[in-house]
Image: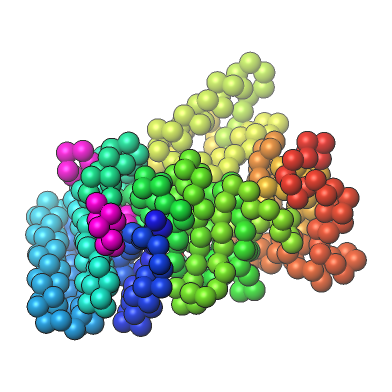
Amino acid sequence: MVVMKFGGSSVAAPAPLRRVVSIVGAERRPRAVVVSALGGVTDTLLGMAARAASRDETAALRALEELRRRHAALAAIVRDNADRQALLAGLDAGWRDVATLLRAAALLKASAPAATDAILAHGELASSLLVAAILKDAGQPAEWVDARSVIVTDARHQQASPSAGETAGRLSRLVRPILDRGAIPVLGGFIGATPEGVTSTLGRGGSDYSASLVGACLGAAEIQIWTDVDGMLTADPRIFGLARAVDRLSFAEASALARFGAKVLHPSTVRPAVLAAIPVRILNSQRPAGRGTTVTAEPGRRSALAAGIACLTDLCVFDVPLPDGAGRPAALAAAYGACARAEAPVHVTAVSDDSVAIVVDDGATGDRVAAQLDPGWLVTRRGGLALVAAVGDGFASIRGLASRALAALDAVPVHVISRAPGANHLACVVDRSDLAFAVEALHARLFERRAGRDGGDPASDLAVTHPAAFRGDSQELRA
Ligand code: ADP
Ligand code: ASP
Ligand code: MG
């Protein structure tokens, strides 16, 4: 079987929804469909919860009414009158629950994490009901499955971690029989529930993760991530307009790109696929005939040595002074401990002679870290930063590739450089205002033929000198 996941833009309007019908119809293998909320809906639901919590119940309910209308307009695609009425009734029942939750948030002047998840879940519940009904109306044997009864998670709301064992058990009880009778299960991504049945969500962009879990637990031959770009691109297209699709990536490369901001994949998506050795394909639902990107353990030879450039914005760096001598390890532990207590994911860190630089998200995360750092330490905080990461398995094995990437940034002030032994990336922290220039310079150095010193592939001299680099098995060339 295969898992076909459709992102928000692939289900946002009548024309994309019709493309989903034809893409699912063209797949001959048994398939399960996972869908995101319609584009923009999760943001709207979050905004509604925040408005209700700040006592603007009227505005929250007005936004809910707009959501209701938007979904009802799409429900009109279903031609069969009885099926359309049943769909509308199902959608309305969900919106009534959201209204109740919003009123409760307004009364409480707060939306508790569990309540926010209960509100957010309705984006994917509605889109999956809609897609199941539209597929069925087009003659495909679709059956809606409530993802909350299948994906079992812990109770870390908005950032829940699924339990693979329990989820696998639920999938074999509730989803496998649907496939066995030749039907197409349709589930909302992103959402799950705790073992006690409390609704949870897997973090923004989490529908990819749901698809990967479903695929891994059901032993899929392939996990397809259908989105609005041609695959994993050589750089974030919102920062660099000339990025192009990469046809093959290793799991490790896709994972690093996702972790450093390539939004096309949720960072946890690759893990279940790696464990079950299932290829992940990233495909464009607007151009279904394209090759897309295939992510596997052994991607084989590629023309460029690098895999891509990813970036994160809205970062800040804390510079924590370190004492000399025996006190250093304890001071480092205290600085990292502050991040742990603040539950702040640390993007990169670098220890220098007299300080440690720790890079985290700015805003609320940075404020939490600041609150945990001892005021006596004379820490400095600098915002307005971005991270740019050049990624490729060759960075671990090809001498000269990392320094070549770094040389591309000669003209850019780099605040922090992170380059761990054996890592498949080089990460640099720069001013946000320099990010576009940095990405363009790196792209020219790593991907554009005409930028090479000799007019050829910018990395071709490395490839010729070190053919083993293509197999990723060179020890001697470790940079
Ligand atoms: P979906 O709704 O299908 O899940 P997302 O918006 O989550 O889509 O992810 C697709 C978007 O990711 C693209 O439209 C693009 O703007 C962004 N993106 C960022 N970096 C990359 C990259 N390296 N390759 C492809 N897309 C990227
Ligand atoms: N709808 C969720 C979000 O916007 C999950 C997803 O799209 O993958 O984050
Ligand atoms: Mg996404």
Residue 178 in sight in this render = yes
Q: Residue at x 32, y 36 (%)?
A: 165
Q: Residue at x 38, y 77 (%)?
A: 22
Residue 479 in sight in this render = no
Instruction: Give percent across and percent down for residue 35.
Output: 33, 63
- Queried whether the magenta region covers residue 87, the answer comes back as no
Q: Which residues are magenta?
A: 177-198
Q: Where's the C terminus, which quadrant?
A: top right
Q: Nearer the viewer, residue 131 or 156?
A: 131
Instruction: Give percent across and percent down for residue 200.
Output: 25, 48
Q: Residue at x 19, y 83 (%)?
A: 79
Instruction: Give percent across and percent down for residue 402.
Output: 75, 48
Q: Where's the N terminus, which quadrant?
A: bottom left
Q: With respect to residue 214, does 441 lie above or below?
A: below
Q: Quadrant of residue 122?
A: bottom left
Q: Nearer the viewer, residue 198 or 180?
A: 180
Q: With respect to residue 361, does 379 lie above or below?
A: above
- Queried whether the magenta region covers residue 190, the answer comes back as yes
Horizontal side of 250 relative to 341 (left or right) equals: right
